[in-house]
Image: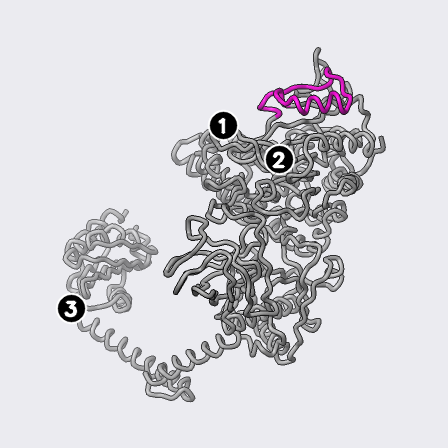
Amino acid sequence: MQPYGVNQLRKMFLEFFESKGHLAMKSFSLVPHNDKSLLLINSGMAPLKPYFTGQEIPPRRRVTTCQKCIRTGDIENVGKTARHGTFFEMLGNFSFGDYFKNEAIEWSWEFLTEVVGLDPNRLYPSVYEDDEEAFEIWNKKMGIPAERIFRFGKEDNFWEHGSGPCGPCSEIYYDRGEKYGCGEPGCTVGCECDRYMEIWNNVFSQFNNDGHGNYTDLIQKNIDTGMGLERLACIVQDVDSMFDIDTMKALRDHVCNLSGKQYGIDHETDVSLRVVTDHIRSVTFMVSDGILPSNSGRGYVLRRLLRRACRHGKLLGIDGAFLVKLATTVIEGSKDGYPELEEKKEFIFNVIAKEEANFNKTIDQGLAILADMEAEMEKNGEKVLSGENAFKLYDTYGFPIDLTSEILEEKGLTYDEEGFKKAQEEQRAKSEGTFGTHSYTGKEVSVYDQLDAALETEFVGYDNLTFDSKITALTTETEVVDALSDGEKGTIIVEQTPFYATMGGQEADKGVIRTADGEFVVEDCIHLAGTKVGHVGHVVKGMIKIGDVATLEVDAKNRALTERNHSATHLLQKALRTVLGSHVEQAGSFVNADRLRFDFTHFSAVTPEELKKVEEIVNEQITNALAVVTKNLPIEEARKTGAQALFGEKYGDVVRVVDMSGFSVEFCGGTHVKNTSEITALKIISESGVAAGVRRIEALTSEGLMNYYAEMERLLKEAAQLVKATPENLAEKITHLQAENKSLKGEVESLKSKMAQSAAGDILDQVKEVKGVKLLAAQLDGVDMNGLRDLGDQLKEKLGEGVVVLASGNDGKVSLMATATDGAMKQGAHAGNLVKAIAGLVGGGGGGRPNMAQAGGKNPAGIPDALAKAEEALADQIK
C-alpha cells in the first residue's frame, strides 16, 4: 500500500467511479441551495436531496462527488481530541434508481483493495441485522467468511432522518493494528478504540418513512455511499489522526513555526495547535463560498471559528496577525481540488485580515468590560459572575469563556457555569442549522411537489418575446388541476417559454398567455424543481386547459427596461473593481424595470469622490456604445476569458458568458441589452452598508432616471415658489433668507434678554443666607433656558459669592437652572446635586456640573415647592 496524499486519493476516487459510468460533479457550495433545513452543507448527499426524492431529474443516474462539508455541533470538543474537526471532505458515489446493493458493495471493495491497495484481510464489513440480502452479497458473492461480517442494530446500521427516504447501511471497517487498540480482551469491530476504523458507509435507500415509523418500499431505490477523505488518508498514510495527514500536517507545521511550539509535547499546546489548524481550514473555505462574518446564521459560525483560531493563536504566543499566513497554506494545499480558493484568495485574505483585526480590538474591549463586571461584583459583595454576563462577554464581544474563567479564578472568583450553558444552548440553534419544519429536502412543502418530475421547460426568451408552446401542467394554489377558469389564480407550466423566471437578481418577466379559449395574465415567473418554469397569475377570461397550445407574450417594455438595469450592474461591478480594487465581489443584486440594486464586498464606506469616479466610468462605457455579445462556452474555456463568476454559484459544464466588448466579461444567465448605449445613462442615488464587509449601491438608468429627474425638477420648482424665487436664483434666495433669519434671531435673543432682566426686577431682595452661603431662589415666568442661563450669570456677578436657583414656567413646561460660585463650591455647594434634588417636584429630572446645572419638567405648579426645597438641599450640602 502506497502512502497516497490527500489530493491523489481524491483524484483516484473520482476517476474510479467515472470508469464505472458515474458523472463526476464538482463540490457544491457550503451554502445550501434552496434548503432551509441546513445552515451549512454537512454531508456528501445533502446537496443531492432532490435527486433522491425524484423531485428533480439528475444530470446522470450515476454521480460521484468530493463534497466539502462543515459540522459545528460539537465545536467545543475540537482540539481537545484528535478526532474532532469542523471541516472535512466527503467522497461519495450515488445511484438514483440505477444500480443497487450488488454493485455498491462490489465497487467499494474493489476500490479499497485493488485501487488503494488495502489488505483485504484487515477489512471487515458490517450489515444491518435484518438485511439478509446485503449479508448474502458479502458472504457468497464477495467471499467474505460469515464470522468476518458483523451485524449491527438500527442505531448503528440504519440511516434515517425524520420522514423521507431511508434504509439499511453496510459499513467497511479497517483494522489498523494493535498499536491503535485499547488492549482489552475481545476488542473487535464496534469497539470505541481507534483500532477498527470505519472508512466506508453504503446506505441502501430503499424505504420511505412517513415520519411515524411506517416504512414503505421506494419505487426508486437509491445508493448513497460516503467515505471521509481525511479518514481514508489516515489509514493509507498510517498516521494517528487527521491532523497528521499530509495537507493538514503542512498546515499544522506552519502553526508550529509561527508559534515556536512543537506538536506532541504538551496536551494544552496540542489542543491549541489543533484548534488553529482545523478552524483556519473551515474559515478559508467558508469565505471562498461568499460567507461573511456576522452575528447570526452561517456568518456567526464563521465569526466564531475565526475568533477561536485567533484566541488559540494568542495562547500559543503568536504575536500580531497570523491567520492570513495560514490561509495561504490552506489554499496551496487544496487548490488542486478546489480552484475557487486560488481564484478568490485576495478576497479571502481581506475578509480574514479585517475580522482578525476587529477581534484583537474586542479582546481589549472584553478585558475592560470584565473589569467593570468585577467592580460591580465587589460592590455587591458577590463572588460569582452571572451566567448571563459571562455569555454576553462570550457571544457579544467574542471573549472566550476559558479566558473569563481564568481571570476570575486568579482573583478568587468564578462564574455561573449552568447559567452560561443555558444561555449558550439558546444560542446554539444559530450554529446548528435547523429552521422550523420542512420537507426532507429542506424546502417548504407546496403544490409544486405534486408535479411530475419529468416535466421540463426550455427557455427560449433570449431570442423571442412571443412564442407558441403546449401547456403541460396547471395548478391552483393548492392542487394540480386539468383546467383553470375565469378569475382563478394558478400556475401554468409549458414546454417552452420566452418568459424569464426570477434568477440571479433579475426580476421575472410579466405578460400574457393566450389560448383559443382563454387568457391568463402572468404576474410572476418562478423556477421549480428541475428545469420547470411556473407562470404565476390569474385567468382574466375563458378557460385554460392542459394540452392547449398557448401563445406566450412577454411585456416587451418591462423586459427592455429590466435589461438596461441588468446590463448596468455589469458595468457597475467592473467600475467598482477598477476604482476600489479586485477584492470587490458581487454579494447580491436586484434589477427590475424601475431601478437596480447592487451589493458588493468592501470594508469601508465608498467616498463621494470614489462614487463620482465609478459613475463617470460607467457613463463613459455607455457613451462608448459597447457591443454586448453572449456566448455559451465550456466552463474551462470560459474561465480562460477572465470572466467574472459569482460566489458560491454552481455552474454546469457549459456556461453563458456576457461580454461587453472586453470591458466587462461575466458568467450570467440573465437577459441583456444588445448595446450599452441603450442604457442611456446611470445615476447612483445612494450608497450604504448592509452587513459587515458588504456595501449597497442603488442606481437608476434609462426611463427610471428620466422619471427621477422629472420629479427632482418638480420639487425644485415647488421649493422655489414657496420662497418666491425661480430655480435659477433659488440658492441665492435661500442665502439671503438665512442671513435675514440670523439677524432676526439675534434681535429676538436681545429682546428676550431685556425681558428677562426686566422680569428679574428687584429679585436680589429675595436673597437668603443658608449656613453662611447666600442663596437666591426665584421664579421668572416666560423665560426660556437660554434666558435663565444668561440671567443666572448676571445675578451671580451681582451676588458676589453664593448660589442662584431660577425656575420658569412656559407653555406648560418648566425650565430649572442652578449655578454656584467658586467660594460657594468650596463650602460644599454643588449645582448638579441641587438640581437633581428638586427637579422631581416639577415632574422632571436633570443634573450637571458643580458650578452649573439644568433640568426640565412638566409641572409648573410644583415650582414654589421646588424653590423652597432648594434651601433645604443647599443646607445639606454645606459643611
Image point 68% across, 19% down: which residue?
150
Residue type (three-letter) at the residue carrying disc 1: Gly
Q: Residue 359 location, x and y as percent?
A: 58, 47
N-terminal of the two: label 3 or label 2? 2
Residue 608 versus residue 225 in the image, above or below:
below
Would residue 846 be found to the left or right of residue 175 on screen? Answer: left
Would residue 292 be found to the left or right of residue 374 on screen? Answer: right
Contact, mark 3 vs mark 2 (Cβ under 8 Å): no
Image point 40% across, 63% down: which residue?
542
Q: Quadrant of residue 167?
A: top right
- Given residues 275 and 756, the one toward you in this image is 275
Contact, mark 1 vs mark 3 (Cβ under 8 Å): no
Residue type (three-letter) at the residue carrying disc 2: Lys
Q: Which residue is mark 1?
A: 213
Estimate the spatial distance between the alpha carbons at disc 3 and disc 2, rounded to whole Å.
102 Å
Report the mark closest to the observer, 2 or 1.
2
Q: Quadrant of residue 268?
A: top right
Estimate the spatial distance between the alpha carbons at disc 1 and disc 3, rounded to whole Å.
94 Å
Q: What number of labels is visible?
A: 3
Report the mark closest to the observer, 1 or 3.
1
Task: Based on the picture, tell me whether residue 465 belongs to the magenta stretch.
Answer: no
Q: Which residue is mark 2?
A: 221
- Considering every residue shown, the one lying at the far top of the view is 185
- Considering every residue shown, the one lying at the far right of the view is 2
Q: Residue 445 location, x and y as percent?
A: 47, 44
N-terminal of the two: label 2 or label 1? 1
Q: Which residue is mark 3?
A: 762
Image point 52% across, 62% down: which residue?
549
Stretch in magenta: 128-157
Residue type (three-letter) at the residue carrying disc 3: Asp
Q: Quadrant of residue 330?
A: top right
